[in-house]
Image (cartoon, grey):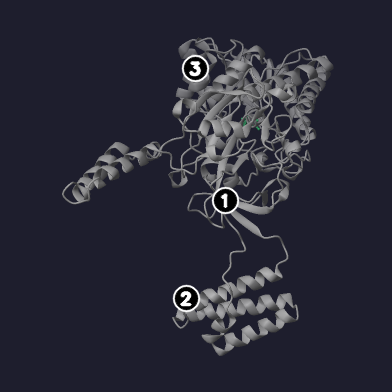
Amino acid sequence: SALYRIEGWGAPYFSVNESGNIAVRPYGTDTLAHQEIDLLKIVKKVSDPKSVGGLGLQFPLIVRVPDVLKNRLESLNSAFESAIQAQGYESHYQGVYPVKCNQDRFVVEDIVKFGSPFRFGLEAGSKPELLLAMSCLCKGNPEALLVCNGFKDAEYIFLALLARKLALNTVIVLEEEEEVNLVIEISKKLSVRPVIGVRAKLRTKHSGHFGSTSGEKGKFGLTTTQILRVVKKLQDSGMLDCLQLLHFHIGSQIPSTALLQAGVGEAAQIYSELVRLGAGMKVIDIGGGLGIDYDGSKSGNSDLSVSYGLQEYASAVVNAIRFVCDRKSIKHPIICSESGRAIVSHHSILIFEAISASAPTAMNPVDLSFILEGLSEDARADCRNLMQAAVSHESENCLVYADQLKQRCVDRFREGTLGIEQLAAVDGLCDLVSKMVDASEPISTYHVNLSIFTSIPDFWSIGQVFPIVPIHRLDERPDVRGVLSDLTCDSDGKIDKFIGGETSLPLHELEGNGSGGGANAGYYLGMFLGGAYQESLGGLHNLFGGPSVVSVSQSDGPHSFVVTRAVPGPSCGDVLRVMQHEPELMFNTLKHRAEEFCGQDHGEEGTYATLVSTIARSFHNMPYLVLASPCSLTA
Ligand code: PLP
């Protein structure tokens, strides 16, 4: 497991058990040894056609562990609780979950349920997100906040004010100065006293990728001048008491507590100034940014790593706010954070299969006399020089002559004066030479039953690296180094960057698999820490839809678990519908065509029926490859 740095990024939820499989510890450090769940057993169970009510789920597969979600919420709250106790802070913490990180119904409902004892609320950034937050919070703690961020039109503000009428603790956070006019106007019309927040554009700048919208020139929030104009407008309307919350967000993945304290400290100064100006301030909302240590290095050196844990984060926040408020002798505000990544990343594991591996050594035997036969005089000279350089171990010259030879042959092939067999033979010779000269380890390509665009979109779009590890055979030495190539017809559909700055991953030989052949005993890889953003950002490139999803909880017996929910991924018909195609009409068109060309009179007996049922099944099945039954696996 050291090869994959599991102790670094996986603690306290993932480890390797004595069978060499990844074990999930649903309650983090509170998990007892017999409560660990073996991921491979989950995979076997839910993909077995006889299991999960005869569903036999297809891959790729997301395994959700709601208890991990619960543990994240409890850990975050207890980190703030400890910091508050230790520092004598005279108010409390109550966070909100930004639903954009993962809007899955059951994820949001679980967060509301598990967060209820801590008054945990939700953050919405658009009208549909607001609708879902409103309906979910009807079952939450009545004090839980519903923070309304994002750009707003009259309808958004209407809805948010309506939410207050429904006794939901809603705060409209102004992201644009003009929004204040709409809030004043509509709240008067509806006779609702709004609770207003303002998002400040801080000068503290987070220099990583996720901080590109922070700082004075950032995309979001109000400048100090704009904040002062909003205060004046609210005062003139007799509504300054409605301004109760100050929000800021300096970016996701804040790398260090030093930067965090600088941002929180600056915001606390603005908060205290708003108190001085007569606003009814109660809450400081520090946004998201609580980071994940994706590579387990705790270095804080890149977007991949942060140098603190939950406790250090909470202590730094409480300390920075307390320091400013005590100096200004103002009441300690309620602390709210909008942590998304830190809450949902761990609870979801993406499992996918390797289909086949192409070894880099696959090469044609080289027949030198055959090659020499058809070559021009120049090319023969290259060949002779190449041999000479090889005998004298002049690696660089070898490569120069091989390149030259290849180029001459390609030119002649283009002219039509060299046959394809000879071009292939020259390619083989050049491959052999470069392999002899290149002393580095050969890299295999493992083809995986996955779309990176759908399931790991941040890898493709912003180069975000996630820990990827085989979920079994971790007691065997992985003898191969490989990159992963997905099912899409796109050269970007490959993963060739891994944690630790590696450009390949240690992998095991596929069992029962010749080079390029299909695996007959599954090889399963897991992508970890991807519960935030990946599901909500994924697209439909090549019309590969989302994965199947199961939710799993620990159950009474030792090492046993129950599958509490199992949902097959979208079918071909489902993904076609997203792009406005109508699968029912398409099926009828194809059925009529089959009748016309393969009906009783034309085709062999049974052809028509087989054709139509195959078409029907294709609409019904997921777009991914259906491989050998994982029942053949040895757990
Ligand atoms: N709040 C706001 C306003 C955001 O823009 C974001 C995401 O960037 C978040 C909260 C969530 O941040 P994180 O996932 O880093 O917790």
Identify the residue at image location x=59%, y=64%.
362
Q: Compare residues 357 and 228 and report the one nearer the observer.
A: 357
> Where is mark 3, residue-wise?
135
Residue 250, position in %: x, y? Answer: 68, 34
Of the residues shown, which amino acid type is indicated by label 1? Gly
Q: Could you classify mark 3 by the number of other residues whose Cα lies within 10 Å: few (under 14), some (14-19), or many (20 or more)?
A: few
Sooner in the amino-acid sequence: mark 2 or mark 3:
3
Kindly indicate whether the residue at mark 2 contacts the one at mark 1 (C-beta within 8 angstroms).
no
> How many C-alpha atoms fall within 10 Å of the one at disc 1: few (<14), some, or many (≥20)?
few
Gap in Å between the C-alphas at discs 2 and 3?
A: 66 Å
Residue 101 appears left or right of 500? left
Q: Is residue 552 above or below residue 442?
A: above
Q: Position of residue 202 (x, y in %)?
A: 70, 33
Q: Earlier in the sequence, mark 1 or mark 3?
A: 3
Name the mark on residue 420.
2
Viewer-side residue, 145 vs 19: 19
Which of the 4 quarters of the picture holds residue 342? top right
Residue 253 in view here: yes
Q: In whole angstroms, how far apart are the C-alphas of marks 1 and 2? A: 33 Å
Which residue lies under the disc numbered 1?
512
